[in-house]
């Protein structure tokens, strides 16, 4: 168990640019989640995969955000035409097992700063 | 998604005291809960899981679940400065949702 890995750890970008983050979950975990967290708030759900299928996407999520999980392994989260309000910590988490019975294992996060 | 509410704090306790953290939830169907600890600038990590009414103890930590009153709590005995962090509760769900968490400060 090497843990959930996220890359990059930090990303600074200018408003209007596109950014892509990567998450490598724990290898035997079939569920993968993306959350966003801003200062003083709890993690906010963005989207969720079971294997390669994206099963749920937050209604609050702008269509500038897209996520993929090809082959049910690593996942990418892309933000197009970034805005200053996108500045946050983006957390990836994975879990295994029956619905909701397994805890989330979080990566170290990618901190995005949009200038 | 299942809603949870936590007092954001900060809750300040002296070293050695008992810290009591509470979480209320809106979905009566929630059967079990996870408690996560998040240090400043770090990601959340699981510390406790409780699935039945009553208490569950693990070292200095005790989780309590009261389904009738729809609250879950976390007690930390003999609090240490290293316990200073934000504590998040999340109901068991295929889409875990989080409240704001409670910030705990343990001062020497």
Image: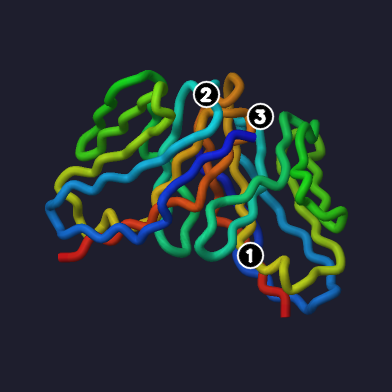
Mark 1 element type: strand
In the rendered image, the residue lying farthest to the left is B16
Quarter of the image for the C terminus of chain A: give it: bottom right
Q: Are marks 2 and 3 on the same chain?
A: no
Disc 2: host chain: B
**Residue B69 vs residue A86, the one in the foreground:** B69
Crowd class of label 1 (few under 14; some 14 to 19; many from 20; radius 10 Å):
some
Horizontal side of A74 relative to B58 (left or right) equals right
Chain containing mark 3: A
Which residue is pictured at 44% across the width and 47% down the height? B6
User: Vertical placement of A88 versus A115: above or below?
Assistant: above
Label 1 sits on residue:
A88
Residue B28 numbered tag: 2
Q: Where is residue A28 in the image (x, y as percent from the top left)?
A: 60, 29
What is the C-alpha distance between the residues marked 2 and 1? 32 Å
Determine whether B103 is above or below B31 in the image.
below
Which of A97 and B65 lies nearest the eye of the viewer?
Answer: B65
**Mark earlier in primary sequence (3, 1):** 3
Describe the element under mark 2 as helix, strand or loop. Answer: loop
Mark 3 or 1: the one toward you: 1
């Amino acid at each position: 168990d090497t843990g959930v890995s996220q890359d990059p750890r930090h990303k600074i970008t200018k408003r209007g640019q596109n950014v892509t983050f990567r998450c490598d979950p724990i290898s035997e975990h079939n569920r993968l989640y993306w959350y966003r967290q801003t200062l003083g708030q709890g993690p906010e759900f963005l989207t969720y995969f079971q294997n390669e299928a994206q099963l749920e996407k937050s209604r609050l999520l702008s269509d500038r955000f897209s996520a993929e999980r090809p082959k049910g392994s690593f996942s990418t989260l892309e933000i197009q035409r970034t805005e200053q309000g996108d500045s946050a910590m983006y957390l990836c988490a994975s879990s295994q097992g029956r619905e909701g019975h397994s805890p989330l294992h979080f990566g170290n996060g990618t901190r995005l700063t949009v200038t | 998604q299942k809603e949870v509410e936590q007092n954001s704090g900060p809750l300040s306790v002296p070293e050695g005291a008992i810290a009591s953290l509470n979480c209320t939830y809106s979905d009566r169907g929630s059967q079990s809960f996870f408690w996560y600890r998040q240090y400043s600038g770090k990601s959340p990590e699981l510390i406790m899981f409780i699935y039945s009414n009553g208490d569950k103890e693990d070292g200095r930590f005790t989780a309590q679940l009261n389904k009738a009153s729809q609250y879950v709590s976390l007690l930390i005995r003999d609090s240490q400065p290293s316990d200073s962090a934000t504590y998040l509760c999340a109901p068991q769900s295929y889409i875990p949702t989080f409240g704001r968490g409670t910030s705990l400060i343990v001062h020497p």
